[in-house]
Image (spheres, rainbow, N blue to C red):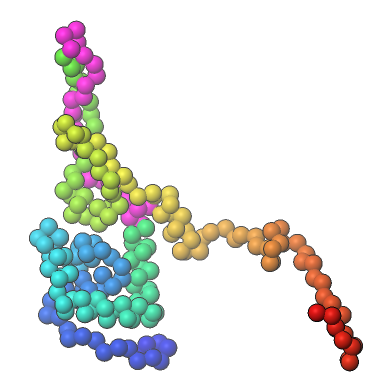
Amino acid sequence: MESNGILNPEPPKPLRSRGAMAYAFERSCGLPPAAACRAAGGKVENGQATKWEASRGVQAWIAHYRRLGHTDEMLAAKRARIEQRLELAAYGDILDFATIEEMPIIVGFDDEGEPIRKLVKQPVIDWAKVKASPYSAIVSGFEFDKDTGQLKSFKRDDALGASAQLRDMHGFSAPKKLGIGNQQDGGAIEVSWKQPPAEGQQTNG
């Protein structure tokens, strides 16, 4: 029974796999299949997310958990998932997965048009480790060189925007001055009224 006294809906038949049950719960909290799979301890690269997503039993539990979405417990769980996601974007550092290596870059051309290369120390990110970590959720928009196939750039979730959302969730925002009605400066409101007609007196309109 829920905290408000309403009976919970009848749950489906329990699944044999604890991982599948955990996956269903994470999916009901709004996580996409790959992220839910990782959160449940599964391996996306082995096709576990696809297998669980295709299971009728898992889908039944996802639907059941979503029907419980208005309970205090489910709301707390969903809030926790949102906070975790925002914290990754706000504080995550992709360079944690990088090593500094010397790489040749073209700095010019000689008289015969041949490229002149120079060894420069640059961070090289191990994208396999990023993919296997929760930080894969905050990077996207990969752009590759059309000739060499090397990664040129990628996009990262806005850290400042995530920090601002966390600030609002935790109630750290500065108080805002609000006016009443249409009063932008909070000043006095002008009020007007009509004298009610005397008893038996007719009104126009």
The C terminus sits in image quarter? bottom right
Residue at 21% x, 80% y: name it. 60
For residue 150, above or below residue 41: above
Residue 54 visible at all: yes
Where does the image place residue 74, in percent across and percent down from the top left?
34, 77
Where does the image place residue 165, in percent across and percent down from the top left?
44, 58
Residue at 40% x, 87% y: name it. 3
Horizontal side of 174 relative to 95 (left or right) equals: right
Report the front residue among 133 and 147.
147
Where does the image place residue 115, in percent across and percent down from the top left?
18, 17
Report the front residue among 147 and 12.
147
Residue at 31% x, 71% y: name it. 29
Residue 100 visible at all: no
The N terminus sits in image quarter? bottom left
Magenta residues (range)? 87-113
Horizontal side of 181 relative to 200 (left or right) equals: left
Report the front residue among 75 and 101.
75
For residue 155, above or below residue 75: above
Where does the image place residue 16, in percent across and percent down from the top left?
12, 80
Inspect the magenta stretch and tell me whether residue 91 lies in it. yes
Q: Quadrant of residue 8?
A: bottom left
Residue at 18% x, 49% y: name it. 129
Q: Quadrant of residue 9?
A: bottom left
For residue 131, above or below residue 190: above
